[in-house]
Image (cartoon, rainbow, N blue to C red):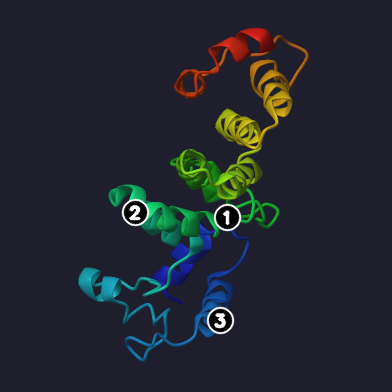
């Protein structure tokens, strides 16, 4: 019985034995297959992984595999660093989004997502930020189809966030539907509430977006 199998069972919070954890590792190793760069498994033997060799302790380490969250981050960094020329990278990042980040978790599993540095929340914010950039750029260039696609993607990933709603209002306005834009601002932003209490104060960021788009008069009417 190895220390790293004990540690794996502990970290994953499974009610399993280290032996069963080792079986799961074998299954994952088969799923991932062979690393074309090295000719070895993407998930090598814990005693042979680079991190294990460096530390002198067995470590399970997946090599040369990108998950969607990592690829999203890379596309975002490259896209934002290139300015307007990087909008295609940002759009490619949004195409990876299929809904709320990490919303298909096994019941009772993945408890690490609710502890400490919340990866799921970071990804929600990242999707909203990227979509807002793409929506704004697309509206400025007159591409309402791309603007709507970006805004709807953000609303799907972050249904409780205000920025995607503001972006959808801007898209509706650009499409020639000012009454729909007013409705979104009134019902889904300014007067939105999740309980019987009065609508909460708008966040500073929401106020900033409204000011940037010069919707002050509309928000006065909405409230």
The answer to whether residue 86 shows anywhere in this view is yes
Q: Is residue 128 left or right of residue 43?
A: right
Marks 3 and 2 sit apart, C-alpha to C-alpha, by 37 Å
Where disc 2 sits, the SS reads: helix
Q: Residues within 10 Å of mark 3 (few under 14, many from 20)?
A: few
Task: Give residue 147's position: percent from left, percent from top.
Answer: 56, 44
Task: Give residue 98's position: percent from left, percent from top.
Answer: 63, 56
Residue at 55 percent across and 42 percent down: it is 114
Residue beneath disc 2 = 85
Residue beneath disc 3 = 31
Residue beneath disc 1 = 97
Pointers 1 and 3 in contact (C-beta within 8 Å): no
The answer to whether residue 223 shows anywhere in this view is no
Where disc 3 sits, the SS reads: helix
Which quarter of the image is occupied by the C terminus?
top right
Residue at 63 percent across and 35 percent down: it is 168
């Amino acid at each position: 019985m190895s220390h790293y199998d004990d540690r794996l069972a502990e970290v994953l919070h499974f009610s399993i034995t280290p032996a069963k954890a080792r079986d799961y590792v074998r299954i994952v190793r088969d799923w991932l297959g062979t690393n074309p760069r090295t000719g070895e498994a993407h998930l090598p033997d814990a005693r042979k992984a680079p991190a294990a060799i460096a530390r002198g302790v067995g470590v399970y380490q997946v090599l040369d595999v990108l998950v969607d969250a990592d690829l999203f981050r890379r596309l975002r960094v490259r896209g934002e660093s290139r300015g307007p020329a990087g909008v295609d990278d940002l759009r490619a990042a949004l195409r990876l989004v299929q809904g709320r980040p990490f919303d298909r978790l096994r019941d009772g599993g993945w408890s690490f997502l609710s502890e400490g540095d919340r990866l799921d929340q970071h990804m929600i914010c990242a999707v909203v930020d990227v979509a807002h950039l793409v929506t704004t750029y697309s509206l400025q260039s007159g591409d309402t189809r791309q603007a709507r696609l970006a805004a709807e993607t953000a609303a799907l990933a972050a249904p409780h966030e205000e920025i995607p709603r503001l972006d959808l209002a801007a898209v509706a306005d650009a499409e020639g539907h000012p009454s729909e834009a007013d409705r979104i601002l009134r019902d889904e932003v300014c007067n939105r509430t999740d309980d019987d209490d009065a609508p909460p104060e708008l966040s500073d960021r929401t106020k900033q977006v409204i000011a940037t788009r010069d919707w002050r008069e509309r928000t006065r009417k909405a409230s």
